[in-house]
Every structure is written in structure tokens, then in C-alpha cells.
Amino acid sequence: MSAGALLAGILPWSAKAADSQVKLTGTLVHHVFFWLKDPNNPAVRKQFEKGISQLLKVETIRLSHVGVPASTEKRDVVDHSYTYSYLVFFDSKEEQEIYQQHPLHLQFIEECSPLWSKVVVYDSVDG
């Protein structure tokens, strides 16, 4: 079962984290943080968001979330400095590799990379 199908079947969460656990065996999680050069410019944000919306059409993406920093409390361990968070799940490393070479991913990089000053990527698999 794919991560997307698994999560679609259990969301919204009905149990507390301590009561149950979701294991995404074999899933590759790709989490990207973007810092835009001009984050307060509505035109820049619109262009970036349009690029992300096209990128999410890559067929190997099983589950996704695009967000902005939450207004949670300020603590030393919380980084609110990024502009956008982009989180996608793939069924396997091979599916993520297809995504990396996909024309929509390459187009996103070409069209949107001039908009950002920094990008940080965290990829993870179950341990």
C-alpha cells in the first residue's frame, strides 16, 4: 500500500499519538525549506506558489504539504526563518529519483531558483 493511500485512510487523526503509530515502511520523505530573496513581494510569492503547484503534478508524489512558518512559540530549537516548507512522500528511493529528473522538477528549478536565496533539503527513510 502506498504512503498516500495509507494516510488518506487514516486522516484526519482520530487517536492520540501515544495511542497508535503510523509506520510508512519503505517511504522516502523529501522535506525542502526555501528562503525567498524577496519574501514580502506578492508577485514573487505568486510566482513561487505557481511553480510549486506545477511541481506537485509529478506522478510519483504520493502525499504532499506546502506550508509557511506557523505562529508557534519562539524557542531556540524552532526555526521560523524560512519562507516556504515543501514536504513530499514517495513510495521508494526509485520513485524519488524519477521525480528528481522529471521535466516538471527541472522546470521548477529553472524558473524558480532565481527567487530564492537559500534551500535546505532533508531526505529520510525509516530506520
Image: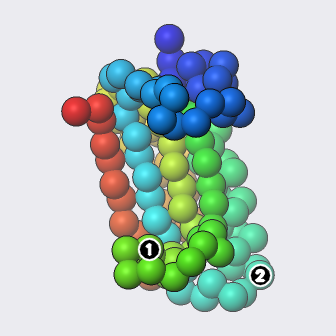
- Whether tag 2 and tag 1 are in contact, CB under 8 A, the answer is no
Q: Which mark is residue 42?
A: 2
SS at mark 2 in the image: helix
Q: Which mark is residue 12?
A: none
Front position in the image: 88 or 109? 88
Front position in the image: 12 or 100? 12
> Given the current orientation, which residue lies at the most extreme top position?
1
Q: Looking at the picture, does residue 53 appear above or below residue 103?
A: below
Q: Kindly identify the amino acid type of the residue bearing the numbered disc 1.
A: Val
Q: Looking at the picture, does residue 59 appear above or below residue 49?
A: above
**Can you say which quadrant of the picture contains the C terminus?**
top left
Q: CA distance from mark 2 to mark 1?
A: 25 Å
Residue drawn at x 69%, y 51% is: 53
State the residue position of label 1: 78
86 left or right of 51?
Answer: left
Q: Position of residue 41 (x, y in %)?
A: 72, 87
Res 23 visible: yes
Q: In front of the other: label 2 or label 1?
A: 1
Q: Looking at the picture, does residue 97 appear above or below residue 123?
A: above
